[in-house]
Amino acid sequence: MSVVVRIPTPLRAVTKGQGELKAEAGSIKELIDRLEQDHAGIKARLCEENGSVRRFINIYVNEEDIRFLQGLETALKAGDEVSIVPAIAGGAGGGVPAIAGGAGGGVPASAGGTGDGGGVAASADGTCAGGGVPAIA
């Protein structure tokens, strides 16, 4: 039974740039194993060492989150659409930090930010070091 798998941009390096794959599998667990056979390294990005889906990875079958279905045992049938969606959150490191309390580069948090990477300073307490536009206290 062939299912369509939508691959997010951050994982496309493992799939040779492909954003959509077709695979044969009867469950999400089987699908991940099949993807690993065809695209080595993808399972490590999706799953913890114990085999569970990483907490920042969301997997949907026909727009239903597998966490609210049967998890890795969620059954698949021909024509199902599986979407792999990495969660977007956080703020440690580069890029744009979290909305509140973020630390790192880019644009610091909008409230209580402690980022030190420059850009636009926090709008609440202005504790961002690195220049840019000063805080509005």
Image (tube, grey):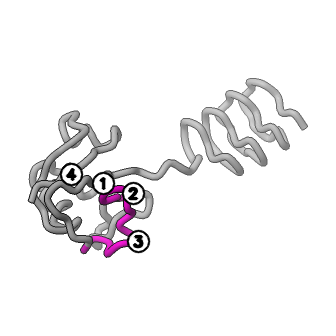
> Is residue 66 found inside the magenta-colored segment of the image?
yes
With respect to residue 25, does 133 lie above or below? above
Q: Which numbered tag is attached to residue 45?
A: 1
- Mark 1: which amino acid? Arg
In this figure, which residue is indicated by the disc labeled 3? 68
Residue 65 vs residue 8, the one in the foreground:
65
Closer to us: mark 4 or mark 2?
A: 2
Image point 76% across, 33% down: which residue?
121
In the figure, is residue 120 to the left or right of 94?
right
Disc 1 residue crowd, few under 14, some 14–19, many 20+, Cα 10 Å: few
Q: Identify the residue at image location x=21%, y=51%.
A: 41
Mark 1, secondary structure of its residue: helix
Mark 3 or 1: in front is: 3
- Graded by Cα atoms within 10 Å as few (under 14), some (14 to 19) or many (20 or more), the crowding at tag 4 reads some
Label 4 and label 2: CA atoms lie apart by 15 Å
The part of the chain drawn in magenta is 57-73
Location of mark 2 (residue): 57
Circles 2 and 1: CB distance less than 8 Å? yes
Q: Which marked residue is nearer to the observer: mark 3 or mark 4?
A: 3
Q: Nearer the viewer, residue 27 or 117?
A: 27
Question: Disc 4 on helix, strand or loop?
Answer: loop
Q: In terms of sequence position, does the residue under pointer 3 or pointer 1 come before the other?
A: 1
Q: Earlier in the sequence, mark 3 or mark 4?
A: 4
When asked about the image quadrant of residue 107, the answer is top right
Residue 26, image x and y in percent? 14, 67
